Amino acid sequence: MPRSATHDLLILGAGCAGLSLANELIRRDSKLRVLLLEQRTEYHNDRTWCFWAPPQHAYGHCVSARWPSWRFSQGLERHDLSSAQGLQYQCIPAANFYADSRSKLKTQTAIELALGHSVRSLESKEDGVLVRCDDSEFYAPWAIDTRPQPPASQPYAQHFIGLELVAEQDCFADDLAGVMEDMACDEYGFRFNYVLPFSPRHVLLEATRFGRHVPKDALERDLQALLRARLQNTAFRELRREQGMIPMQVAAPAETAGRLLQAGLAGGAARASTGYAFLRIQHWAARCAEQLLTKQRPIAQPPDPRWRRWVDQLFLRVIEQYPERAPAFFMAMAGGVASDTLLRFLSDEGRPQDFMKVAAALPKAPFLRALPAAMGASRA
Ligand SMILES: Cc1cc2nc3c(=O)[nH]c(=O)nc-3n(C[C@H](O)[C@H](O)[C@H](O)COP(=O)(O)OP(=O)(O)OC[C@H]3O[C@@H](n4cnc5c(N)ncnc54)[C@H](O)[C@@H]3O)c2cc1C
């Protein structure tokens, strides 16, 4: 017997992707009955989202810091870049985004956020999706699943630990974001640091490594070394910590045929070669809301075009195979490619011409050696 729908759309997981879609629907004055099922019972300031963007955008009011310049460094060598087109490196603390999203949700009744609802099982049927939580079940013609999926065993990934703190004295130049600082390589592979100063005393320091086997204590040691180097002996107060692991894998195009669609990190939102996902999630959310409001099927996180998947595959193979050369590769890109070209290459705006300019700045031999394997993998 056909079930009657409790909602028009179920969103499983109300983190960045789930809330972004809700925000886009609210922005368009949607009357669709939407339910967000979220396992947490409250939100914490559990991460920061950084990205390059123009000064004005839909989440401009959530931004806590903007930097007109950003730095790549290896030893004493530095490249400080800025955008001729006015792009800034910007940071949104998750707490600002969660609070903003929840206040928008309160302005209307069609979209409901159900906290403390952990999705236990799903059944995708011909005309809809049945979702079961502990003591309730819901049915809708469409469901979008944004719950994190367990990664394949030991994927090549970006691992990081960050500490936000306030120092007792001025220690930082707050007009410059360190996006890839202190690049180096050791027995665990390629590593670098983020240094994001919100003021001369207030900073987020983050130790990052690319690799398959990254022991947590190695990252913790990196963080302690970073603290010593940047603060010297200045006393500080710890505000919060964040940590994560973002697989750096070229995602196979997500399943788009059924009524259950994947989005967010689980749907391949992170750019394989950089781990940046926030803006890609926003683009998906806007397009998905547009589809829903024109009575078309919602969309999963769209796959990258084939040429970009291939470029990312090639780049990742080379970095994994030659981690000791990775600092020189990134420094060559930062020093040899115009900032806006590099930003387009790192973002979804990149065109094949941008890739050609980046390739021209890089040593050819390792990339040529990795070419056949990358071509084979991106065809799969
Ligand atoms: C610490 C950290 C820092 C990051 N920094 C950046 C950055 O600077 N720039 C950038 O572009 N990207 C960044 N990322 C990557 C990416 O943007 C984030 O991971 C982003 O939060 C992904 O959004 P999402 O909706 O896919 O996942 P999440 O935001 O993790 O949302 C998933 C939601 O699903 C919920 N959930 C899980 N299981 C269930 C269940 N069974 N039932 C119901 N709900 C469930 C979770 O509680 C969560 O709220 C960062 C990631 C991390 C971890």
Image (cartoon, rainbow, N blue to C red):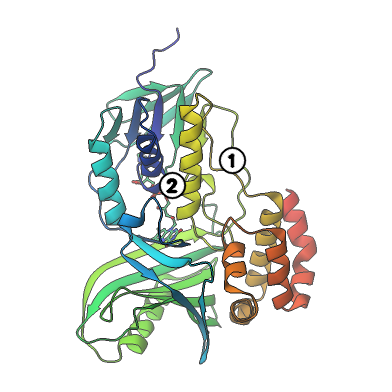
Identify residue type, mark 2. Pro
Q: Could one spot residue 150 in this view of the protein?
A: no
Residue 299, given in percent of the width and then of the height, sits at: 53, 35
Image point 25% across, 54% down: which residue? 44
Name which quarter of the figure residue 133 lies in: top left
Q: Earlier in the sequence, mark 1 or mark 2?
A: 2
283, above or below 222, in the image: above
Category of crowding for the residue at label 2, using alpha-carbon neighbours closer than 10 angstroms: few (below 14), some (14–19), many (at least 20): some
Quadrant location, the N terminus: top left
Q: How far is the residue under mark 1 from the one under mark 2?
A: 14 Å
Determine whether, in the image, residue 344 is placed left or right of residue 310.
left
Position in image of residue 79 (x %, y %): 53, 83
Mark 1 or 2, which is nearer the eye?
1
Identify the residue under disc 2: 148
- Residue ID for mark 1: 254
**Residue 120 versus residue 33 in the image, above or below:** below
- Figure label count: 2
Compared to 50, does 192 lie above or below?
below
Proximity of marks 1 and 2: CB atoms separated by less than 8 Å: no
Ligand 1 within 8 A of label 2's CB? yes
> Judging from the image, what secondary structure is the residue with disc 2 in?
loop
Q: Secondary structure at mark 1?
A: loop
The answer to which of 180 and 80 lies nearer the viewer is 80
Instruction: Estimate the x, y position of residue 375 in percent, counting from the top left.
Output: 77, 57
Please give the name of the residue rendered at 52% of the width and 44% of the height, measured from the top-left corner. Answer: 267
In the displayed structure image, the side of residue 112 where residue 321 appears, left or right: right
Residue 64 falls in which quadrant of the image?
Answer: bottom left
Seen at 53% across and 63% down, the residue is 157
Mark 1 neighbour class, 10 Å CA radius: few under 14, some 14 to 19, many 20 or more: some
Q: Position of residue 140 (x, y in %)?
A: 41, 22
